[in-house]
Image (cartoon, helix red, strand yellow):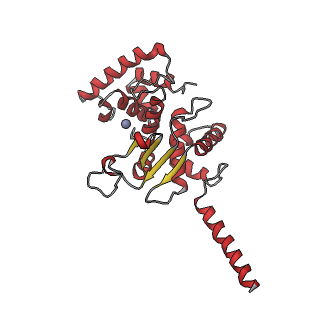
Amino acid sequence: MIYTVLFLIILAFVIFALRGTKTKKPDTFPKAWKPLLEEHVAFYRELTPEKQTLFENRMMLFLKEVNIEGVQLELQDLDRILVAASSVIPVFGFPEWHYNNLSGVILYPDNFNADNEFDTKQQDRNIMGMIGTGRLEKQMILSKKALYHGFSNANDKSNTAIHEFVHLIDKMDGDTDGVPEYIMQHAYSIPWLNIIHKEIEAIRKNKSDIRSYGGTNQAEFFAVASEYFFENPKQMEKKHPELFRMLQMCFHTKN
Ligand SMILES: [Zn+2]
């Protein structure tokens, strides 16, 4: 009898421990994450070793403050790594950053349809990421497929997760309007708007290499141009020097 009880207690411990290691999010940066970051995140790869450590710490701070949840999927390490990296990349130029307007990221396996309770099996599933409103206030919804695709090619100037985090930065002053007053000095608003309008016009006339979705409105322009800026800064500097310098100032990336 006593052995049966002992056996059951040990079994319970083993099950608990196994469950714990499977889904628990780490408190300190796991060594095993480094090769994954090196492999998948070009931005991280190009940092000095000191800055890489800083980047890792910033990722851990984000993971402490924001809860990542998987729907219809079990969260993998790489899911957490790519979400956290996307959150750090646009604000890495700032010594400290807290996404006060975000409490959770909800990851879906595939693109989803916002009108249909995020049913990923619907035919019309075209949304890759979005910032929640109403009952989803302070939530970001992301498609895992789009998240991974964003990091699969560093030079395609597109990255869904960075796009959504830039919307959040834009929204920190209260309006998602393409003018990120929280990080941009007031004096630059008018020159910034002039650049936006010029670039949007070029997109609409099909005379720009900025993704056409950026021509939708000012907020989408800011998010799409920022994807380009973080994915392929060299090309942007060459093709859009004015826009490049403004984004450099905006994101504090100038050394
Ligand atoms: Zn957008």
In the displayed image of the protein, which residue is found farthest to the right? 2
Q: Quadrant of ligand 1?
A: top left
Decide: is 114 above or below 242.
Answer: below
Q: Position of residue 201 (x, y in %)?
A: 27, 23
Is there any visible trace of residue 132 in the rendered image? no
Left or right of residue 66: residue 121: left
Residue 156: quadrant of the picture: top left
Above or below, 189 against 65 in this view is above
97 or 4: nearer the viewer: 4
Residue 30 in percent (x, y) is at 65, 52
Q: Residue extending furthest left?
A: 205
Specify the quadrant that holds the N terminus.
Answer: bottom right
Q: In the rendered image, which quarter contains the C terminus? A: top right
- Residue 73 point in image, percent of width and height: 46, 59
Residue drawn at (47%, 25%), measured in percent from left and top? 173
Q: Residue at x 50, y 17 (%)?
A: 185
Q: Residue furthest bottom?
A: 1
Q: What residue is drawn where x is 57% and y is 29%?
A: 93
Is 144 or 244 nearer to us in this picture? 144
Q: Is residue 7 visible?
A: yes
Left or right, 231 with respect to 81, comes to left
Q: Nearer the viewer, residue 46 or 21?
A: 21
Residue in the image at 48% along x and 55% along y = 70
Q: Residue 54 appears in which quarter of the rendering?
A: top right
Corner quadrant of residue 237: top left
Image spot of residue 174 (x, y percent): 45, 27
Q: Is residue 173 above or below residue 11?
A: above
